[in-house]
Image (cartoon, rainbow, N blue to C red):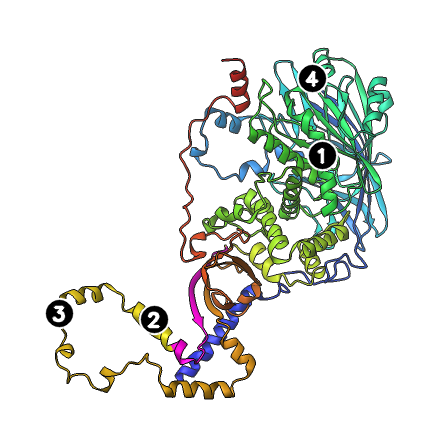
Amino acid sequence: MNKILLFLISLTSLASFSQKKFAQLDHELPTANEYRTASGAPGHKYYQQKADYKMSITIDDKTQKLSGNEIITYTNNSPDKLTYLWLQLDQNLFADSSDSKKIEVEKMEDFKSVGDIRKKMFYYDGGFKIESITTIGGQKMRYFINKTMMRIDIDKPLLPGASISFQIKWWYNINDRIAVGGRSGYEYFEDEDNYLYTLAQFFPRMCVYNDVTGWQNKQFLGRGEFTLPFGDYEVSITVPSDHIVGATGECQNYKSVLSSEQLKRLELAKKATQPVFIVNQAEAEKTEKDKASKTKTWIYKAYNVRDFAFATSRKFIWDAQNQPIGNKNVLCMSYYPKEGNPLWEKYSTKLVAHTIKTYSKYSTDYTYPVAISVHAKWIGMEYPMICFNGGRPEADGTYTEGEKYGMWGVIIHEVGHNFFPMIINSDERQWTWMDEGLNTFVQYLTEQEWERNYPSRRGPAHLIADYMRGDKKFISPIMTNSESIFQFGNNAYGKPATALNILRETVMGRELFDFAFKTYCERWKFKHPTPADFFRSMEDASAVDLDWFWRGWFYGTDNVDISLDDVKWFQLNTQNPDIEKAFLKDQKNKSDVHIGVDRNKKEIKETVNEKDATIDDFYGKRDIYKVDFLDRKEFEEFKEKLDPKDQELLNAKKQFYEIQFSNIGGLVMPLILEFTFVNGTKKVIRVPVEIWRQYEDRVSKVFIFDDEISSVRLDPFLETADTDLDNNSWPRVEFPSRYQLFKQQQSKENPMQREKRLLNGN
C-alpha cells in the first residue's frame, strides 16, 4: 500500500512539475478583447491617437542653444473622455535635478581616471525651459511638470473623436555629447571651431494613450527609450546659411537653400544606382573654413511618423542614390564630415540602400520617401527616416577591420530601426527587446546578405552561450522592464535575436517562421503592438505551439544544457542457435579479458579441478555454447510459427540504440543528433522539443539503424545555445575550455598603417 501511495505521489509531482515548461501562457498574457484578438491581430475596435506638429526651430551656433515654438494638434480616437494630456520632456534627463543622476549605483572603484571624476562633476544647465503654453487663441493653459513628464490640464474633457490644438514655446542648451553624453547633441571640432549637431528629443512630445497602458507616462531615466503616437509634421529649421540640413521627411524648399549645381546633382541622385555627391569633400572643406554669418530656413514635412529628428553642420559631405522598394523609389542619403572618410563615402549610402531592401523582404515594405545615415562620433541612434551612426577612421584615413565592421553593423542596425519601432511601433519605454531584439535579428539576416560569412556579433545560437551560463543573479528574463535589466546588451539585443534565429533555423524552419514573422509585421505596421500580439501572431500564422519557447526564453533565465548521458546497444535475438550461442561465447571471452586472467595463467600452474578429474560434474563438463540437435529442432519449430515479415526483421541485423538524455540547464530544446557509423557515413535526426513534455529532467529515445554506430553528437551544428558541449558526445569528446587571455599590449598602428609603412620602406 505504501509503495502504491508513493508511486501516485511521484506521478502527481511529475505532472505538476511538467506544467511549468509546457503549460500554456494563458495566465501570463492579457485576455484577448475587441482591441487585440487572441490571434494576435488588431481587433475590430482597435484605435490609436494622432499627434500633429507644426514647429519653428532655431539653432544659435554661437551659444549652442535651441529655441522652438510648436503647435500640437491632438486627436482623441479612443472611446474615452480625456481630462488632461501628458507630454514627454526628455531633455529634462539633463536637468541638475534629474533622477537618472540620483539613482545610479556607484563605487569609488568605478572612477578609474581623473577624466571619470571630471565627468561626474561636470555641470551643465540642461533641461527644457518652458516659456509658455497657450491655446491657439493665446490663453494660458495650466500645466504641471513632473521631472520628464508634463501634464496639461484642459478646461473641458476631450471627447472621443474630438481634437485639441495648443502652442508651446521653449528653449534649451544643447548638450555636448562627448562631455555629457546623450542620444543627441553636438560634437565640437576644436581645430576649426566648428559644430556638428545631431538633434532629437528636442521638443515636448505627446505620450501614447492606448488600450493597454492608458497614458504611457513612465519617467524617462535614460535607458528605456521612447513610446510615441503617429502624426504629421511640418518643421521649419533656421540655421547658419552655410549649413546642410538632413531631417525626417522631405525638404519643401530645396530651391531656396541649395545652389543650382546642388539641385542638379540631387536630381541625378534620385535616379542613380550608385551614390552621387550633392556636396563633395572639397566643397565641404571650403565651407567649414569660410563661415557664414547669415541664416537660412529649411522646411521639412513628414507624414505618418512617430517622431522627428535632424542633423545640421557646415562640415557635411552629402551623397545619395535611389533604391526601389515595391512600386516606390526611396532616396538613400548620407551626411558626414571629412573625418568619416574614406569609410563613409565608400559604404554608408550603399549600406542604407541594402538595409531597407533586405528589411522590406523580411518584414514589411519601407514606405517612407527617404532613408538617411548621419555620421557622428561614438553614437548609434535611430529616428524616422534618419539615424546617427559612429564609425570613424584614424586621422590619416586608415582604420582597423573592427572599425569597418563596427561602422557597417551600426548603420545596418540603426537604419533597420526604421522598421522596428518606427513603422512597427512597439512600446520601447516598457519593452526594449521588442525593437532592439527584433531589429538585431533582422540585422543579422541583412549582414549575412551583405557579405558571405559576415562576422555578426549577435544572432547565431552559440554566441549567446557564455551569457546564458553566467551567474543568474545578474541575468534578467527578457520580459523585464527596460530600466531593470541586468546586462542590457545581452538581454535586450543578443538573447531575443538568438531566440528568433533558433525559431527560424531549428524549431519552426525558415518557411514557417518567415511567413509568421512577416504576418506579424504586416498586421502591426503603423500600429502599437505588445509582446502578446507578437507571441500570438507567430503561433497563429504557423500552427506551431510556442508557449514553451516564450516561457523558457522570454520569461525565464534557465540555460540550455542537455547532456547525452548514456548509449546502450541492442540487437534482436534471432533465436538461431548457431548465431546466438556464438555471439554469447564471443561476449564471454571479451568479458573475461581483464588483468587477473592474464596473471593467473602465469602464476597458477594448475587448478584443483585440472588435477582431479572427479571434481567436475555435469555442469563442469558441459559446453553451454555447443549447438545440439534439440537446439536446431526448437529453432525450426519457432520458424514455422513465425510470420514471414517477422522472420525478415529478425534476419535484418538491425542495430538498436537506447540513448538517455538529462536536462541540466532547465531550458528544454529539440534534440539534434548526428550519428556517425562504423562505415564512415553520417545521419542527422531531429527530435521535437515535445519529447520533454512529461519528463522534463530526463528522457530516453530508441534509434534503429542498419549499421553499427561509432559515435553520437548532440547539437552538432551549435544551433540550440547549449552552454556545455563537453557532455554532448558519445564516446566523450573533451572540447577546449573557454578562458580569457590576459590583455595583451596592442600595437599603436593598425594593419593599414603598417602596410603604408611597408610600401614606403619605413
Dot 1 and dot 2 residues touching (CB under 8 Å)? no
Q: Earlier in the sequence, mark 2 or mark 3?
A: 2
Three-letter code, disc 3:
Lys
Discs 1/2, front: 2
Q: Earlier in the sequence, mark 1 or mark 4?
A: 4
Three-letter code, disc 2:
Asp
Q: Earlier in the sequence, mark 4 or mark 2?
A: 4
Magenta span: 560-580
Per the rendering, the mark at residue 62 is: 4
* Crowding at mark 4 (Cα within 10 Å: few <14, some 14-19, many 20+): few
Dot 2 and dot 3 residues touching (CB under 8 Å)? no
Residue drawn at (55%, 17%) of the image: 756
Residue drawn at (82%, 32%) of the image: 250
Q: CA distance from mark 1 to mark 2?
A: 70 Å
Three-letter code, disc 4:
Lys
Which residue in the protein does label 3 denote?
Answer: 605
Which residue in the protein does label 1 denote?
Answer: 352
Quarter of the image where one finds residue 533: bottom right
Q: Nearer the viewer, residue 2 or 181?
A: 2
Residue projecting furthest to the front: 629
Q: Earlier in the sequence, mark 3 or mark 4?
A: 4
Which residue in the protein does label 2 denote?
Answer: 586
Q: Nearer the viewer, residue 116 or 269?
A: 269
Q: CA distance from mark 2 to mark 3?
A: 25 Å
